[in-house]
Amino acid sequence: MYARLAAFEGGDVEKMREQGEARMTSDSPFPDGVRRALLLATPDGSRRIFITLFDSDEALKASEEQFDKMGDDIPEDVRGKRVAVETYEVLVDWPE
């Protein structure tokens, strides 16, 4: 399994929460191949990490264009500025 981590700074946490909840009521808002997704925020909401999990590195790489398009759907004043994107191989996923 592989993980894509995208880090964001700034933005509006409450509007992100509202938009995220609204998007989850429709079909999957995530690119094809996403197995699981987590959005984590610091207690003050100033930074967030968006983690998506994929079964393969190929599926992760195939999703990049769709992730770029997601950035067009959510304005930077809401999502914040993306400051990093990294890929990791998942070595442990407990209790899965």
Image (spheres, rainbow, N blue to C red):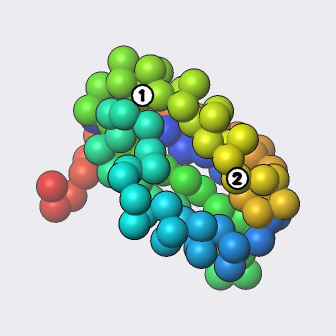
Quadrant in the rendering for residue 45: bottom right
Residue 30 position (above or below residue 65): below
Q: Identify the image quadrant of the C terminus.
A: bottom left
* Residue located at (72% from left, 64% from top): 47
Q: Secondary structure at mark 1?
A: helix
Q: Residue 47 shows which numbered tag?
A: none
Residue in the foreground of this view, choosing between 70 and 88: 70
Judged from this view, the residue extending furthest toward the front is 26
Choose top left, top right, bottom left or bottom right for residue 54.
top left
Residue 41 picture location, percent across and down: 61, 70
Between 43 and 22, which is closer to the camera in this rendering?
Answer: 22
* Residue 90 can be seen in this image: no
Q: Nearer the viewer, residue 69 or 5?
A: 69
Badge 2 marks a residue whose secondary structure is: loop
Residue on which the image places disc 1: 60
Q: Position of residue 49 (x, y in %)?
A: 59, 56
Q: 36 or 77: which is nearer to us?
A: 77
Dot 2 corresponds to which residue?
74
Amino acid type at mark 1: Leu
